[in-house]
RNA sequence: GGCGCUAUCGUCUAAGGGUUAGGACGGAGCCCUCUCAAGGCUCAAAUACGGGUUCGAAUCCCGUUAGCGCUACCA
């Protein structure tokens, strides 16, 4: 059974690319009956913040996807260190006493790639131990094989066969001069210890994988399977960054814009993956059932946003699809919460509340529409638009609408069919087109010229309010 | 600079030797209609470039170009 992990480093909010990586890990774990692990890669004490950690959890909580085990790397540093020294003891790593500044100077890209300091790589164990004992600072470097034609390879589940000459890999660091493990060291030691079977992550790690394989092998552990995901990029082709692209890169932006998590997950899944059957509107369970790395493509996906349209239109479209089709019982609580925050006194009765939501939801795009365009359906504080006023100001409109109200008031029947009958009768008796009263009703009852069918509007607004609004004309 | 990855409509993508290069979003138009949506129909819109291989290439190979990634004692 596969064991997969999502390993964010808490240096910012939950990035949409990270969210997608989480989702793909989750999809695979759940599809294969595996284990989903959340590992916080918080080894960089300089940049980690508690706030960032919270925002990652906040984002994941909103997405509503779960995990089975959780670890924090910072609590496992001894394990990483032990692993590093194990590699050293096997002769596969060595101490490099070169000061950091000197190393930096020596690395001149124009001169070609830097691989290692020969003197340090060749230092005898005795000399190395002696200098270390004397307190001289060092970094522990991996001794990358230097025989002619040594290749490191693996088969990526998405990018297929990958191979690299060892001579194109520098002797990378395992332990810093302060004794703390580097990312490569910590990550691999943990993956081995936690028995990760599949590493599913962004393609930005594809090149790093060669180093990781070297570490896994040096530790004698099984080398996990790898699946790299194409990256999410901005319309200008650069990678998504908060500094450059602003809030579009944070998942909370979409939550705040009124997305239902189901829709946003759906959108993210479609970036770099497809079910091969042209289906795009999918529930997470369907994606899970259809998921395979075969369906993941290899080129980066552009998130389509601009100044004028900060939200990808396809994401918006998916949101409308989910909004109008998801079980009302699932949608209603979210709308309820929104109403409370907006200070709208919605009906307390849940069945009644759901009825209203169900009637109006099919023309809304985002949750916020319920508290904006939907005000009149839930409470009495709403504005009447100039267009609606025009409809009411048409000759006879107000009088006949009042008359309609009186007739409805005198009847116990408030069904849509009955309302329609009465309305058409009033129109006919007075020699006006039904449209005058139909559009007038909508204007009178909601203050708007757009919305559900006029008779449904009566039901949605409710008898008491509807009659009051007609009477008040 | 070195190494690696990638390249189909504006965007997400399908087609892994033979298709009028398909679908979706977005755009335009028509139909439906009590409004607005939805829905149905139609239209515009793509194989980066150059060479091969082949009877035949979006698909395979090579090169060019472009983008991205790695090249840190960051992750």
Image: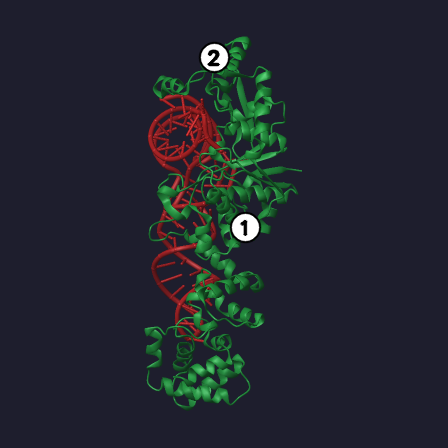
Chain colours: A green, B red
In this view, A166 is above or below A47: above
Rendered image: mark on residue A469: none
Can you say which quadrant of the picture contains the C terminus of chain A?
Answer: bottom left
Secondary structure under tag 1 reads helix
For residue A68, what is the image quadrant? Answer: top right
Q: CA distance from mark 2 to mark 1?
A: 48 Å
The quadrant of the picture occupied by the N terminus of chain A is top right
* Along the viewing direction, whichever of A459 and A136 lies nearer the viewer: A136
- Could you tell me residue A472's position as x and y percent? 40, 84
Q: Nearer the viewer, residue A350 or A319?
A: A350
| Residue at 46% over, 33% down | A204
Asked whether A65 or A393 is in front, the reply is A65
Residue indicated by mark 2: A120
Image coordinates of residue A190 in percent, x first then y, are 59, 31
Label drawn at residue A61: 1
A222, above or below A92, in the image: below
Q: Position of residue A2 (x, y in %)?
A: 64, 37
Determine whether A78 is above or below A390 in the image. Answer: above
What residue is shown at x 56% (from left), y 53% (from top)? A283
């Amino acid at each position: 059974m596969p064991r997969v992990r999502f390993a964010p480093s808490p240096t910012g909010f939950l990035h949409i690319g990270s969210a997608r990586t989480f989702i793909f890990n989750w999809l695979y774990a759940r599809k294969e009956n595996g284990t989903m692990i959340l590992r916080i890669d918080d080894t960089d004490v300089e940049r980690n913040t508690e706030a960032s950690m919270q925002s990652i959890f906040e984002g994941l909580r909103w997405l509503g996807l779960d995990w089975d085990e959780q670890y924090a790397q910072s609590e496992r540093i001894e394990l990483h260190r032990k692993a590093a020294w194990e590699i050293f003891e096997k002769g596969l790593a060595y101490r490099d006493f070169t000061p950091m500044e000197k190393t930096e100077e020596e690395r001149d890209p124009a001169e070609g790639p830097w691989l290692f300091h020969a003197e340090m790589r060749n230092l005898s164990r005795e000399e190395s131990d002696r200098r270390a004992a004397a307190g001289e600072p060092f970094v522990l470097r991996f001794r990358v094989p230097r025989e002619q034609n040594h290749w490191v390879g693996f088969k990526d589940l998405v990018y297929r066969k990958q191979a690299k000459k060892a001579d194109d890999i520098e002797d990378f660091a395992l332990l810093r001069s302060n004794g703390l493990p580097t990312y490569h060291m910590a990550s691999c030691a943990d993956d081995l210890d936690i028995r990760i079977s599949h590493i599913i992550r962004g393609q930005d790690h594809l090149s790093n994988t060669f180093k990781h394989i070297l570490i896994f092998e040096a530790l004698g552990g099984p080398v996990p399977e790898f699946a790299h995901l194409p990256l999410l990029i901005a319309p200008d082709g650069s990678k998504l960054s908060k500094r450059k692209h602003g809030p579009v890169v944070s998942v909370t932006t979409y939550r705040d814009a009124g997305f239902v998590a189901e829709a946003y997950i759906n959108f993210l899944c479609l970036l770099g993956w497809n079910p091969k059957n042209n289906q795009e509107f999918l529930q997470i369970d369907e994606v899970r059932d259809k998921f395979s790395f075969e369906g993941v493509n290899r080129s980066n996906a552009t998130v389509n946003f601009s100044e004028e349209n900060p939200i990808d239109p396809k994401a918006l479209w998916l949101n409308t699809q989910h909004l109008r089709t998801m079980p009302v019982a699932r949608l209603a609580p979210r709308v309820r919460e929104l109403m409370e925050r907006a200070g709208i006194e919605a009906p307390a009765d849940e069945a009644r509340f759901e009825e209203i939501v169900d009637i109006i939801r099919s023309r809304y795009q985002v949750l916020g529409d319920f508290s904006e365009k939907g005000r009149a359906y839930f409470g009495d504080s709403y504005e009447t638009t100039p267009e609606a006023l025009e409809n009411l100001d048409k000759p006879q409109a107000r009088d006949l609408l009042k008359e309609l109200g009186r007739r409805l008031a005198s009847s116990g029947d408030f069904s849509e069919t009955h309302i329609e009958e009465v309305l058409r009768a009033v129109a006919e008796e007075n020699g006006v087109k039904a449209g005058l009263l139909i559009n007038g009703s909508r204007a009178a009852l909601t203050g708007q010229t757009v919305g559900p069918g006029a008779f449904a509007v009566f039901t949605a607004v409710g008898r008491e309010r509807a009659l009051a609004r007609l009477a008040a004309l």
